[in-house]
Structures are given as structure tokens and as C-alpha cells.
């Protein structure tokens, strides 16, 4: 059951008290995202991340399990924000750039039939797997945007000047941490203060991210 009043209202007011603005403010922070629906969703995630952080702060739970839970949630939320922004900027804003188009390409071995007389020689080789050998050539294939690695997307964003290399490296770190946050990893990482600082940096890098992206968009006209 929910907390009684006025406790519930006090907690909500505490969470909102130090925020720079309401949901609309957090949504407008991402004014560099042209897709209105996407901007709204990212803004909601940003507002939720800040609001929940303040609730954790209000509870003052100075126990490792509480800090670990907060770190997990914060890293996951901010990594998702960066991922959504980078994806949009590349494939919607800069989709025609050669650097972006190359992200869809990969090299693969494609089976190619060989002339019969060559196959006969191969089959006669003194090898156990001679009958399994087939002809193949290197060919360029295309993949879907959803299957492109995030670090490759960030590398393309850096080359296009959307963000700089230092910030890009940090953003990849947040995304990697999101994918590797699990109980076994926690057992190996005992420096809780470092993890807290890492999660805090994920939030603090949003402003330079916005600044760099906005500058890039302005230069593009």
C-alpha cells in the first residue's frame, strides 16, 4: 500500500525540488532531436532518471545493496538515452553520409561453385574433410541498422564531427557497462565509490553531449 499523506507528497516534492524543471523542460533539453515522438520518449527517460535519483537520495539508504541498485538503474537509463540519440543523429540526420552508409556493409564469404575438374582434384586430396570443401568468394553484404554495433555507430559519429573522441569513448563505456551489469560482474568490481562516480558522470556528460551535437547541427545549416 502507498505511503500515507503527507509523507507521500513530501517525498514527491523533495524529488522535484532540486530539478531544473518539469517533464517539459527535460524533454526540451533534447531539442536537437527532430523526431518529436522520440524526443518526448527520451525526455521522459531523462526526467525519470533524475526523479528516481532524488528519491534514492531522500531515502538515504547507506547500504551497499541500495547503492548497487541505484548504479544499475542510472547507468541503464543514461546508456539508453545516449544510444537513442546517436542512432537518430546517424540514421535520420546524417543517413546519406558515406560514413553512415558504410556501417551497413560487411564482408562475408559466399559459396561459389567451382568448375567440375577443380572439384575433382579437391575431392581426391588426402584429407579427411576433402569432401566438405566448397568454393567461396569474399562479397560485400548489407545489414540492418538494428544489428550495427554501438561502438561502430559512435566511431562514425566521431568521424562526422557529431561528438569528439573523448566524449565518444566515455559514451561507449556507459553502453558497455549497461550490457555487463550483472551479479557476477558486481562480485568482481568491489570499488563502489568508483561505480557511483561512473554513474554520476553518465548524467554529467549529457550537457557536453548536447553542446557538441548542437554545434554540429548548426554547422550543417
Image (cartoon, grey):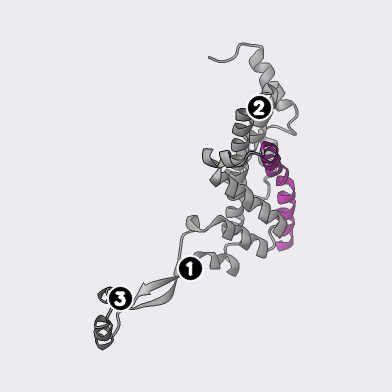
Distance between mark 1 and mark 2 Cα atoms? 45 Å
**Neighbours of disc 2 within 10 Å: few (<14), some (14-19), many (20+):** some
Q: Of helix, strand and loop, which one carries label 3?
A: loop
Residue under label 2:
56
Q: Residue at x 52, y 40 (%)?
A: 184
Q: Quadrant of residue 141?
A: bottom left
Q: Position of residue 30 (x, y in %)?
A: 67, 45
156 vs 28, nearest the viewer? 156
Q: Residue 48: which disc?
A: none
Q: Give left or right: position of 208 versus 188.
A: right
Q: Of helix, strand and loop, which one carries label 2?
A: helix
Residue under label 1:
106
160 vs 219, nearest the viewer? 160
Q: Quadrant of residue 167?
A: bottom right
Q: Residue at x 59, y 36 (%)?
A: 73
**Neighbours of disc 1 within 10 Å: few (<14), some (14-19), many (20+):** few
Q: Position of residue 169 (x, y in %)?
A: 67, 55
Q: Is residue 22 magenta?
A: no
Amino acid at each position: 500500500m502507498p505511503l500515507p499523506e503527507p509523507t507521500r507528497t513530501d517525498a514527491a516534492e523533495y524529488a522535484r525540488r532540486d530539478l531544473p524543471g518539469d517533464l517539459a523542460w527535460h524533454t526540451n533539453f533534447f531539442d536537437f532531436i527532430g523526431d518529436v515522438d522520440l524526443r518526448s520518449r527520451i525526455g521522459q527517460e531523462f526526467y525519470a532518471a533524475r526523479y528516481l535519483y532524488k528519491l534514492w537520495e531522500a531515502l538515504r539508504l547507506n547500504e551497499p545493496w541500495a547503492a548497487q541498485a541505484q548504479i544499475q538503474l542510472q547507468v541503464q537509463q543514461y546508456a539508453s538515452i545516449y544510444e537513442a540519440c546517436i542512432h537518430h543523429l546517424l540514421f535520420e540526420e546524417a543517413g546519406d553520409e558515406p560514413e553512415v552508409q558504410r556501417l551497413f556493409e560487411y564482408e562475408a564469404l559466399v559459396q561459389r561453385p567451382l568448375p567440375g575438374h577443380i572439384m575433382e582434384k579437391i575431392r581426391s586430396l588426402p584429407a579427411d574433410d576433402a569432401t566438405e570443401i566448397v568454393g567461396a568468394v569474399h562479397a560485400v553484404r548489407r545489414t540492418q541498422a538494428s544489428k550495427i554495433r554501438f561502438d561502430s555507430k559512435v566511431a562514425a559519429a566521431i568521424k562526422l564531427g557529431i561528438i569528439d573522441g573523448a566524449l565518444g569513448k566515455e559514451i561507449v563505456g556507459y553502453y558497455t557497462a549497461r550490457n555487463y551489469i550483472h551479479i557476477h560482474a558486481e562480485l568482481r568490481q568491489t570499488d563502489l565509490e568508483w561505480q557511483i562516480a561512473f554513474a554520476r558522470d553518465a548524467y554529467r556528460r549529457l550537457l557536453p553531449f548536447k553542446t557538441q551535437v548542437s554545434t554540429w547541427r548548426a554547422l550543417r545549416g
